[in-house]
Image: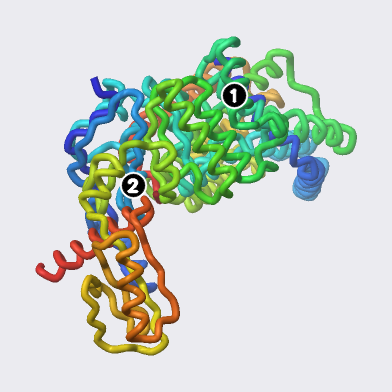
Amino acid sequence: MAIIEVDGITKIYRQYKRFPGLAGAVRSLFTRQYTEETAVHNIRFSIEEGEAVGYLGPNGAGKSTMIKMMTGILVPTEGALRVMGNVPHLSRKTNARQLGVVFGQRSQLWWDLPVLDSFDLHRSIYKLGERQYRDNVELCTELLGLADFLDKPVRQLSLGQRMRVEIAMSLLHEPRVLFLDEPTIGLDIVAKDHIREFLRTVNREKKVTIILTTHDMKDIEAICPRILVVNKGNLVYDGTVASLRQTLGNEQQVTIDFRHDPGEVDVEGLTLIEDEGVRKTFLTSRGGTAVFELISRMAQRYPVEDVSLEGADIDSVIRRLYQQLAEEDKRKTQIS
Amino acid sequence: MITYAKFGMKAFTNQLSYRAEVWLRLLGNLIAILIQTEIWRAVLGSGRMDGISLEQMITYSILNTLLLTLLLHHISGQVDASLKSGSIAGELIRPLSYPLYLLSNGLGQAAYQLVFTVVPSLLIAVLWFGFLPPASGLHLLVFLFCLLLAVLLSFMLGYLVSLLAFWLMNHFSLSWIMSGLRLVFAGSFIPLWFFPDGWRTLAEWLPFQYLGFIPAAVYLGEITPAQMPGMLGIGLGWAVALIVLTSWLWHRAIRRLVVQGG
């Protein structure tokens, strides 16, 4: 049975209307008008035990809302949700024992306490046995390199050190599912690598199910074979990165900066998608050296300052997907 | 239970990092006591008012100033801050009872105040201003029990305000009202003895008197052993009522919880 089952989940936030200005502020006090905002709309997916899934989407797509519902701290407006067989918000505390949660932007550590004291409190909360606790602390200390700052108060740690501690703590009680909400945000490259490596190990060797939201596609590449992409509350993609690349096509984007605006440019094999005068962006389906030929042909006819190519790496695949989604949205609003 | 004891200990030791505050609080307490004793000296002279002597009023003022310190907690601010920053999410995904977590924090803070502010202030005040002994052994015992009750009630009232903040999204105005009501109706500065009849009746219908007036009146022996069961019964009744009310509100609050941001 799937460890997480999401069946037609919708979350609508109700926001009381506020009116601008001083008179508006007074008016806001007496009115109960509200607007409804759909943060998550009819989402359906299921995740098997031991999977590592990236949950992606532009800002405001409803990622955190979904994670909050899966951890049971937010109640869905509609739909059925099961995590480890339970309805999360009804069995919040039961599920909590088997869940690990890391919020990249919010610390769950006790600010004034040394790291080890935080671990010790965590141990009491989750009622861990002496042996289990010591083994897990040792393992995390070794794999995440915590030894140097275990007795420092949390407030004195650097962001990278703190994140490593957060992740270690979320795993001390050996959760079956680990939710990570932007765990690498604001970290330097070395710290990011360290964390990715560790998460991959945890997923592959300990079979901990991982659900990860991030804006850094390298996280996805390193950890998650499967991605779910959401946009404006809707699930728009569920599958591997590779097959997403195929659905979007192997097109490359070519952005050319001209010395002066050449006006209409017509070169076979290049489709103009964006025109900012001296900077034009084209799309081409030709790969490899064919692209360079196209560019040199262009350079012969017009003075070119700079050229940049955007290939099929994960970043550009996702960027293209987001752009495509934004265009669709625009079209829809134009129609209505 | 051990977990919550640990939280209490943690709240206690956490406060140790703010050592400068200990001295400031001590100084603040002594100034507050000085002002009150001088006022009562001017009002009462060497006479009595409603059967209360100056010595009793000085002891009353010292007890009440120290009670204010003891009952100082930041529950409402704490909940409000974690509600606004969204860190309440982190508190809720632990297999913990958040209310008990708050309570153990509050108790830890109270214990800290007791050891580092109340006891030193008391020692200095005893030497400087004079302090009457408790009316009797029984009165002392009941007084100590009243202190526990006061800590509990004070916590519950703060907790009530912080729960209402789930709906209002701000606790400040409520906390302000609460502290005003408390200052007057607890009898912290003017004992209920000196209230006009109507106001006194009102004060006796409210729980605030248990936060100041009652403990001090018990200590001074102004409450007879015959009155004690009734008085303690009503106090405990308030505690139970507040516990029932807040746990009901807590479940409602959780149900409508919308974590801000994110």
Q: In the drawing, does residue B56 fall left or right of residue B73?
A: right
Residue annotated with mark 1: A121
How many neighbours does mark 1 have within 10 angstroms: few (below 14), some (14-19), or many (20 or more)? Answer: some
Where residue A315 sits: x, y (%)? 38, 54
- Is label 2 in contact with label 1 (beta carbons under 8 Å)? no
* Residue at 59% in and 10% down: A131
Q: Nearer the viewer, residue A279 or B205?
A: A279
Q: Nearer the viewer, residue A116 or A14?
A: A116
**Vertical side of B54 occupied by A268: above or below:** below
Where residue A239 sits: x, y (%)? 25, 40
**Helix, strand, or loop for circle 1?**
helix
Where residue A79 sits: x, y (%)? 18, 35
What chain letter is assigned to the residue under label 2? A
List the single residue furthest toward the left: A335
Residue annotated with mark 2: A56
Where residue B125 sits: x, y (%)? 84, 36
* Residue at 32% in and 71% down: A293
Q: In the drawing, does residue B156 fall left or right of residue A317?
A: right
* Residue at 43% in and 31% down: B93
Q: In the drawing, what numbered circle is on residue A184?
A: none
Where does the N terminus of chain A fall, quadrant-wise?
top left
**Helix, strand, or loop for circle 2?**
strand
Q: Nearer the viewer, residue B105 or B111?
A: B105
Asked if one can make out residue A287 in the rendered structure from this viewpoint, the answer is yes
**Vertical side of A305 occupied by A247: above or below:** above
Q: Earlier in the sequence, mark 2 or mark 1?
A: 2
How many neighbours does mark 2 have within 10 angstroms: few (below 14), some (14-19), or many (20 or more)? Answer: many
